[in-house]
Image (spheres, coloured by chain):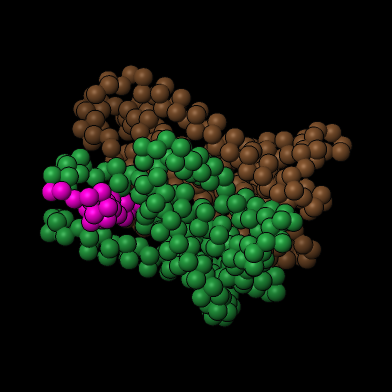
Chain colours: A brown, B green
Amino acid sequence: MLKFNLLIFGDTGWGDEMLFSCIMTILVSLSAMGLGVFIAIFTAWAKISGNIVLKIIANFYTTVIRGVPELLVIYLIFFGSSAGIMYISKIFGYHGYIELHAFTMGTISVGIISAAYSTEVFRGAYNIIDKGQIEAARALGLSKINTFIKILAPQILKHALPGLGNVWQITLKDTALISVTGLVEIMRQSRIAANVTHSPLTFYLSAAVLYLILTTFSSKAFNKLEDYSNKNQVKA
Amino acid sequence: MDFNLIINNFFIILQGLDETLILIFLSLSIGFFISIPFALARISSIKILSQIVYYYIFVIRGTPLLVQIYLIYFGLGSIKAVRESFLWILLKEPFWCGVIALVINTVAYTTEIFRGGIQSVTKGQIESCQSLGMNRFTMYFKIILPCAFRQALPAYGNEMILMVKATSLISLTTYMEMTGIARSIMYKTFAPIEAFIAAGSIYLFINFLVVQFIKYLEWKHNPHLRFKT
């Protein structure tokens, strides 16, 4: 049953290990989200740019990533890129097994998943903006880059904030899946601890509590951000 | 990449299709029928009922599905009282653990979707039900719930797609559905890309069918929108 003495800090308990794994989860989620937003800026631009080839590529990307289980995407990227690099290294005469850095690969795979969702959020946010503003900016003689940075980007960010909050929650929960690749985050750590101490209930419950704390606090933070971005808004 | 290998893998992985489909079908249909009373409880004026459902949804939506699966598969099995009770007949099977975990997960999301649907039914409709002398039961089952379902269809379609994807996690409880088979192929052939592309294309096709099904349901239940451009 529940053994709380296993969760104390120090050599006899797993408390400090769980805390470190929690920090690892936060780090992976943050970097995956950052990477996702970075990719999404380009894919969202590809979707609205009017270039038919770019649009087809971006649509294919978001449809496939959102239609295939996250676990498969993570397996494909983690084991697939490892196999790909080994294939290339064989050409150069190296025949050993190459294991990729788990943190980097975890960030990339979750980032690619999260980018597909962020793309749709950005595209939706762009569509809300009145196109008359772009014309007005052009009439004022603003360059395209200035129009984007000074007029469009702040508004897109504001409209995208609630959607990005949802994507963040999805990303945070998706990082639990990269435990299958060996990165020691909350899920992996609790699995190890559960196997060593033979008390799975204790550790999986504490993992659930840790995730709950993370999601609750981040949704509070996003609410604060939304309030901040809406402070100039005239209340209807 | 080896296309012959992909096609080979494709037919091997297809053998796990019925396991995946059963998981999807069971969890979605059980989840659907549990979600309706849960959604009604969530909006009911009895404070305790709605609070219980609120916290249930809060906990389930705030934790990853993988934690829930592990808690049920490994966690519950470690309790001696569970192992000695009748529940063990279900919980010793990875399949039923998977179904239970998926149902618990989908009920939380579907309840919120249905709540939104029910709350979108306009007050005028409820008032006209009352003025026609309907009792509460008829009002809910003939008017409010059908309207709510129609409103909730697009969001429920998203949830169906999420469930199709969620079944792949059940492979981590040693239950051999499509993802599990794809993983075992990878360990045998050391060709991960070919194995996962084959599995992914099947999931993509299932989701494509789900999207078409939802589109058909929306078309069928929204006759008033049919001829608008």
* In the image: residue B93, left or right of residue B42: right
The picture quadrant where one finds residue A16 is top right
Chief SS of the magenta region: helix
Q: What residue is drawn where x is 64% and y is 64%?
A: B86
Of the pair A146 and B108, the residue shown nearer to us? B108
Image: magenta residue range: B132-155
Q: How many marks?
A: 0
Furthest-right residue in view? Answer: A11
Q: Position of residue B203 (x, y in %)?
A: 48, 67
Q: Position of residue B157 (x, y in %)?
A: 36, 57
Q: Position of residue B115 (x, y in %)?
A: 35, 45
Q: What residue is drawn where x is 56% and y is 75%?
A: B16
Of the pair B155 and A117, the residue shown nearer to us? B155
* In the image: residue B39, left or right of residue A95: left
Asked whether the viewer can see residue A67, the reply is: no
The picture quadrant where one finds residue B8 is bottom right
Q: Quadrant of the C terminus of chain A?
A: top left
Q: What residue is drawn where x is 86% and y is 38%?
A: A12
Instruction: Judge whether A132 appears above or below B162 on screen.
Output: above
Q: What residue is drawn where x is 62% and y is 71%?
A: B176
Of the pair A127 and B52, the residue shown nearer to us? B52
Of the pair A187 and B13, the residue shown nearer to us? A187
Q: In the image, is residue A26 part of the stretch drawn in magenta? A: no
Q: In the image, is residue B147 part of the stretch drawn in magenta? A: yes
Asked whether the viewer can see residue A127, the reply is: yes
Q: Position of residue B228 (x, y in %)?
A: 13, 55
* In the image: residue B100, left or right of residue A149: right
Instruction: Judge whether B29 appears above or below B16 on screen.
Output: above
